[in-house]
Image (cartoon, coloured by chain):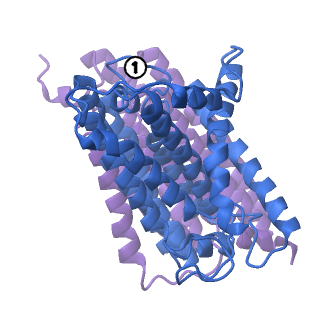
Amino acid sequence: MPKEWVVVYSITDFITVGMLLTVVAMNSLKRMESFLRAYTINSILLAALMAVSAFYLDAAHLYIAAAVTLASKGVAIPLLLRKVVRSLKITHEAEPNINTPLSLVISSVLVVIVYSSLSKGIFIEGFTENTLKVSISIILISLFIMITRKKAVTQVIGLLLMENGLFLAGFSLTYGMSTIIELGVVFDVLMGAIILGVFLSQIKKTFIDLDLDKLTTLKG
Amino acid sequence: MEKLQFMLILLLSPLAQGIIKKLKAMMQGRRGTPVLQPYYDLARLFKKDMTIPGTASWIFHAAPYVVFASVLAASMLVPVFSAGGRPSGLLAGGGGFFGMGDIIAIIYTLALGRFFMALGGLDAGTVFGGEGSSREMTVAILVEPSMMLAIFTVAAASGSTNLGVIANSGNFFFSPAHVLALAAFFVAVIAETGRIPVDNPDTHLELTMIHEGMLLEYSGKYLAVMEWAHYMKQMLLFTLAADLFFPYGIAGAGAGAGIGIAAAGFWAGKMLALCFGMALVESTRAKMRFFQLPSLLGAAFVLSALSMITFVMTGK
């Protein structure tokens, strides 16, 4: 069978581990631009995984889903967020609540917990058997990033990453839902990103700063 | 013949250093020193007289020999172009010496050399020597876990910690775990050889030096021996990286002379590629502040930990 190379060279493993790596790398990044770039790479890898699966499974609708994912999460949302970040003049994340080495260690501990708790009783066979574990790790680490960061923009990116993880989990269990559902989900995320972008500008306008700790101070 | 393969590391390591320097100079638009310059330096240093600090004890005199001997012993345990020979037993089989010790023995033989180098720096009794030693040991503590975890991933994948077996098993870059381990190992090699994000090999600026600080009081033959040991350690680590991650092309047991020569050619190509990579990293990165190093080396540790987890998860 000519398509065996997908399994032989464990292409799906490479792509999913690459996605995990971009999320873990977020813990040690400080600049907003590199944050956005990591998110972009993550989304492109997600689209690539769908394209590889489409090729392997001979499923035409997955090609459409991959193209839509690439266009929205890989191009539109990063461009939008970059515009927001530039217009708000945020270049650096403030020092996170937990320092870099500790948060790196915590996120790898999260990965260990996920792997050890999912090692038995999960019934996925075939070429995406490891994808579910990676996707749940991605969800947990993005949640952790959202908790430990102070700036609103970083939290938005954390939320989007979490959505990527959820998408990956759903994909690994179902090999892609019907096209209309995928389009709906993608449209939802796009709308969410736009609303959050507007929301960020409003926070900036009202509170001068995007540091969410300062939202607790009373405004008269 | 195969028993003498460590001679390649012994004799060609200054050339590798010269090539890295030349590549760096070319990338930075300078003409640079000749490729053979490290040989000229060593020859000149061997001819010069030595100045010994008044406070120095026997440790100062012993350190160069211990450092050189430990690196030489470690390089005997590494397959350079031939991984033949039985994996166990003293001097068994027709291959190299690497039946005598596995990868863990290599890493800790190198640690012995590092320990004596740090002692020698302290023994000279100057401020900069002590400073260099203290920094060197700090970096060593941070590097060791990531290096060992990366090596354990590869060892677990091939089922043995013996380098001959690992190189023969031909795990050529075939799984995500290997890629992650390679990335962690590369950072560890940069830190171990004192290259730019960690230490600057070209400067004697007192506030930044690590390796040079320890050697500051050495001169003449001792300095030559120390420098040569440093070049050898660098090439040894490159060879280790080639054996662990790109063993493709290495000659197996009982291979003929033709295959041996081809394998030596493969090895030379891999060394050139690694030299190029090092020169590229050194030319494009800035040196980090010393107190930022834990964050770089911590990232390397997480990479190697992830590679171990990935290996356990995917089973390859």
Crowding at label 1, few (<14), some or many (≥20) Cα neighbours within 10 Å? some
Q: Is residue A217 above or below residue B312?
A: above
Chain identifier matching the blue colour in the rendered picture: B
Q: Nearer the viewer, residue B100 or A203?
A: B100
How many discs appear? Answer: 1
Task: Name the residue rendered at 61%, 49% in the picture.
Answer: B10
Task: Name the residue rendered at 25%, 31% in the picture.
Answer: B124
Quarter of the image with the N terminus of chain A is bottom right
Task: Name the residue rendered at 29%, 54% in the picture.
Answer: A106
Q: Is residue B160 above or below residue A37?
A: below
Task: Name the residue rendered at 52%, 80% in the picture.
Answer: B90
Regarding mark 1 in the picture, which secondary structure is present there? loop
Residue A39 drawn at (x, y percent): 52, 41
Tell me: A205 left or right of A39.
left
Quarter of the image with the C terminus of chain A is top left
Q: Nearer the viewer, residue A145 or B194?
A: B194
Figure quadrant of residue B121: top left
- Tell me the residue that label 1 is attached to: A90
Q: Is residue B206 above or below residue B113?
A: above
Q: Nearer the viewer, residue B101 or B187?
A: B101
Q: Is residue A58 above or below residue A76?
A: below
Residue B46 drawn at (x, y percent): 53, 31
Q: Nearer the viewer, residue B208 or A164?
A: B208
Q: Amino acid at mark 1?
A: Ile
Chain identifier matching the purple colour in the rendered picture: A
Identify the chain of the residue marked 1, using the numbered disc in the image: A
Q: Is residue B62 visible?
A: yes
Residue B72 drawn at (x, y percent): 51, 54
